[in-house]
Every structure is written in structure tokens, then in C-alpha cells.
Image (tube, rainbow, N blue to C red):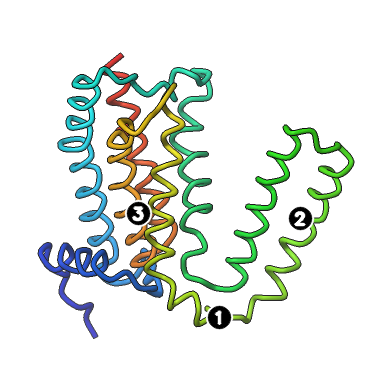
Amino acid sequence: MTDPAPAPLSEILREFARFLRQPRRIEPAGLRAPGALRHWAVLSALMIGAMLAVMLPLISLWQNAFDLAAPDAFGKMDPGLMVPVVLLFAPVLEEILFRGWQTGRVRALWLLCCALAFGALLYASTQGLSAVAVGAGFLVLLLAAPIGWFLLRKRGTPAWFDAAFPAIFYLTIAGFAALHLMNYPSFSALSLPLILPQLWVALVLGFMRLRIGLMAAILTHMLSNAAALGVATLAG
């Protein structure tokens, strides 16, 4: 039995558009599935090409029109750490946090809750919470995360997750884009268009994660960050 013919470019784009009109949970096919590499390549080229050719020039015009500060995320970073953080650590962490759980499996949602609780403890530690309480909380989470992952391994996706998926998907997109306002030294309502590239990236990566898998989204995120870092380097 031969593999099915590769999906035409137009069909891949229509599938993406249909998903954005009505997001739904999809069981990822995996990068080894027939046609998956073609889907990945097309979506990656679409995402990075539109970001470089359309999104970045538009936000540059917007910045100049309203005299807005340029992003300084790269400038804050130790040059020796920039490449591993931007090209490896950030894509892996952001994809796991924002899209790793989007299949809706209970144990993945459990890990998300543990990660959010971990972040809340980190924040509380900067607001005066005692070191003993923070340490105890971290210890509980370090035990709870793997235990919950093991005990919940046979649980599927709850019905409420499927019903709420369109809202969950777009709220996650908005949260991912809004997080990148931190790349700027200051921001206001006029700064919102500056995260248009991250909004676009999140839309494509969100579909890719569900259509192909988490590893596909991580790889494309790495390529996207490499392109952004290259543009920032050339721009000085």
C-alpha cells in the first residue's frame, strides 16, 4: 500500500483557515505521519515569511509614526546566553507552557496547574512570603507533578475542554502575544499593534501543535526566533 499523494498547498492553507474560523481539538498526527513534513514546511514558511515580509515592516512603520520605543529584550541579555536562550530555552519553555497541554488530556492539564502554581510561588517569594513557605510549596509541587502525571495517565480529555476549546485557544493566543509586551521598555494602548507578529506566530503554532504535534511547533518556534534574532542583529 502506497502513501497518499501529498496535500496540495491550497488545501493546507484552506485547512488552516477553516481551523481559525472554528478551532477544535485535533489529535496530532506526528511528524512521521504521511504528508506531515510537507504540512510542517508549508506552515513554517507561511509563518516566518509573513512575519518578515509583512508584520515586521508594519510594526516598524507604526513605531516610527508614533515615536514608540523599540524592543529591548535582546539588549537586556548577556550576549553569551543570547543564542541558547533565544533559540533553545525560550521556544521549548513557551511551547510547553502555552501549547503543550492543548490536547486536553487530564494529566497534561494537571502539569499546567502545577506550572502555574510554581509561577505563583516564585512571584509570592518576591512579595515577602517566607522562605520556609516557598520551599515547602516547591517541595509539594515537585512531588505532586510526577505523581499526578502517573495516576492520571489513563484519563482522556474531559467534555468541558472540547466544549470550551475555541475560547481556550484564542485566550491562549492573546496571552502569548500579551506576554511579549515585556520585550518593550514601556508600553501603552498604542503599543498593542507591536505584538502583531507574536499574535500571528501564536495562531500558526497553535494550529501546528494540534495538527502535527508539539515537536513540530517547537522546531518552527526555534526557526522563528532565529529569524527575529537575525533581523535584530542586522538592524543593530
Looking at the rendered structure, the kind of residue marked 2 is Leu
| Distance between the alpha carbons at the discs numbered 2 and 1 | 22 Å
Looking at the rendered structure, the kind of residue marked 3 is Leu
Q: Secondary structure at mark 2?
A: helix
Q: Secondary structure at mark 1?
A: loop
**Nearest to N terminus: mark 2 or mark 3:** 2
| Distance between the alpha carbons at the discs numbered 3 and 1 | 23 Å
| Mark 3 Cα shell of 10 Å, populated few (<14), some (14-19), many (≥20) | many
Extreme residue toward the top, this view: 236
Q: Which mark is residue 65?
A: none
**Nearest to N terminus: mark 2 or mark 1:** 2
Q: Is residue 146 above or below residue 126?
A: below
Q: Disc 1 marks which residue?
A: 156
**Which is nearer the eye, 149 or 185?**
185
| Mark 1 Cα shell of 10 Å, populated few (<14), some (14-19), many (≥20) | few
Q: Residue at x 24, y 42 (%)?
A: 48
| Mark 2 Cα shell of 10 Å, populated few (<14), some (14-19), many (≥20) | some
Q: Is residue 164 above or below residue 227?
A: below
Extreme residue toward the front, this view: 189
Q: Disc 2 marks which residue?
A: 141
Looking at the rendered structure, the kind of residue marked 1 is Gly
Q: Which mark is residue 205?
A: 3
Q: Left or right: where does residue 159 sit relative to residue 135?
A: left
Q: Secondary structure at mark 3?
A: helix
